[in-house]
Image (cartoon, helix red, strand yellow):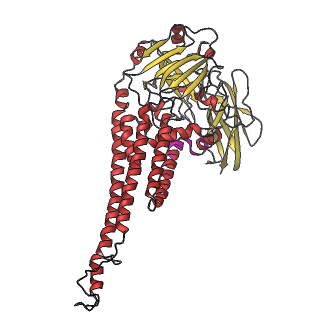
Amino acid sequence: MAALGAGELAAAFAGPDAAPVIAVGSTAIDLTPTPLKEYAIRTFGTDDKPVLLGGIYLTTALLAALTGVLAARRPALGAGIFAAFGLLGSWAALSRPAAGAADAAPALAAGLTGAATLLLLARTLRAATTVAPATLPATVPATTPTASGGSPSDSLATENGPAEPGSGSTHTSRRTVLAATGGTIALGALAGIGGRVLSDRRYDSGAARDAVRIPPAARPLPPPPAAAHPKIPGLSPFVTPNADFYRVDTALTLPRIDPRRWTLRIHGLVDRPLLLTFDDLLREPLEELDHTLSCVSNEVGGPYVGTTRWLGAALPDLLRRAGVRPGADQLVGRSQDGMTIGTPLASVLDGRRALLAVAMNGEALPVAHGFPCRSVVPGFYGYASATKWLVDLDVTTFAAYDPYWVQRGWDRTGTVRTASRIEVPAPFARVPAGDITVAGTAWATHRGIAAVEVRFDGGPWQEALLAPDTGPDLWRQWFHPWTGAAPGTHRIEVRATDTTGAVQTQNRAAPYPAGATGWHSTVVTVT
């Protein structure tokens, strides 16, 4: 507790990402094998980060307890273990992509505080359990009886020598140890909470976000037609509210960026490198983009997909202003936290509406979704197109650089696969016999959906009714009237066809390395 409290307090000045548990956790994420990462996302979903942090805290507590047992006999060795963990935390902090020398300070403070506190507690414990030998005054005969009927040696041993079990000095010693332990816990907790509160105040970007006034679009888009969302209870809204939009990333703490100090550098294979401030970006003619974004980690029928209206500066215009040189074929975005995302450059410049987004559904980007700026390029999963907390754009080549996820074996292009899911009825629902509405959503970003089919219990495919087509970059909702559903357990399957004529494959594949494939199915009981 003392070590973690000191680390949190020091991180209030060095930066929240440098807190020892955060630094170690972030390094653990980078070093975790891809299959284990996919297991964590599949098992814990968006709770994977709290589970990781909880595991680190639990492991730290267990190791500290074992070190304390060891230090009761060998204090110096116990203190050395704490110091070693401080060095390990410093290494983890310095290994982060955007780290500076000051980022090592919180872990060093934690290690030194833990070692010093352990030595003090061990000294207190030894002082409380040391047994002093009894001494007898030379002037008192050992056989002289006392008024109580015992010998003087008995009396003096009780007053000046070792305390008998249950005596007052033993109670005092125990109280001293318990007071020292309790004080350590209280001071450590106070330092940790105080450090976290101070850090939140020093690095709070929420107030800066609230103060931002986003200009309107130069040419506003009309709202999506009401018919794009069939009024079927249980069907996802056509536009996903910001609070419900999925978040999958590696950031254990949200980067906190003051837009007044934010800059974006566009460099690499360009003739005229650019350096833009946030005000510069807001002075660009802002464009709106309705777009369905999905995560490559999404299982078949999974929740990591959402549709929003983005607002931002046209990325192709800025790249042309910088002057892209011949031979460049990759655009690498770098996040404030060091994450790198690579996008095929030809796709950014082929006429699709790629943005440096500053707003989401009519408000400044939420911090969790990239405030103050993120990239959005239709047609690709987020890991290949959507850099949150964007601070750097490097025009380069695929041969010259492998971004974060490509280094870990993921597909280089990240093209979104055709997908569809059943949302109504819910999985394992019990529904009354008769006429039942089956409904859901399908998407093939930047290709669009041409048809959706459903079938029951492996029977013939039946074409579903589609909501109006609102563009190739958006999902399309569908429904199908299931008439005369008979009692019993039934399996419903769905598949989609994109506008190129390609039918969604039945072949089941896991998300790694290029996105999940297969038909989504659900089982319901008709009563």
Q: Across the whole image, how many numbered discs are drawn on residues?
A: 0
- Looking at the image, which residue is at 63% across and 15% down? 329
Give the extent of the magenta segment. 41-50
Instruction: Note whether 263 is above or below 383 in the view shown.
Output: above
- Looking at the image, which residue is at 30% across and 69% down? 172
- Looking at the image, which residue is at 53% across and 35% down? 250
Instruction: Note whether 327 is above or below 423 in the view shown.
Output: above
Residue 178, image x, y percentages: 34, 63
> Main SS type for the magenta part?
helix
Is 396 magenta? The answer is no
Farthest residue in the front direction?
138
Left or right: where 299 falls relative to 48: right
* Residue 239 seen in the current view: yes
Left or right: where 480 falls relative to 372: right
User: Which of the two residues, 20 or 214, is positioned nearer the viewer here?
Assistant: 20
User: Which of the two residues, 291 or 523, is positioned nearer the viewer here?
Assistant: 291
Is 42 magenta? The answer is yes
User: Which of the two residues, 522 or 225, is positioned nearer the viewer here?
Assistant: 522
Q: Quadrant of residue 303?
A: top right
Residue 472, image x, y percentages: 61, 21
Residue 488, image x, y percentages: 70, 51
* Residue 425 seen in the current view: no
Residue 27, image x, y percentages: 53, 38
User: Which of the two residues, 397 or 503, is positioned nearer the viewer here?
Assistant: 397
Q: Quadrant of residue 39?
A: top right
Instruction: Note whether 221 is above or below 61 in the view shown.
Output: above
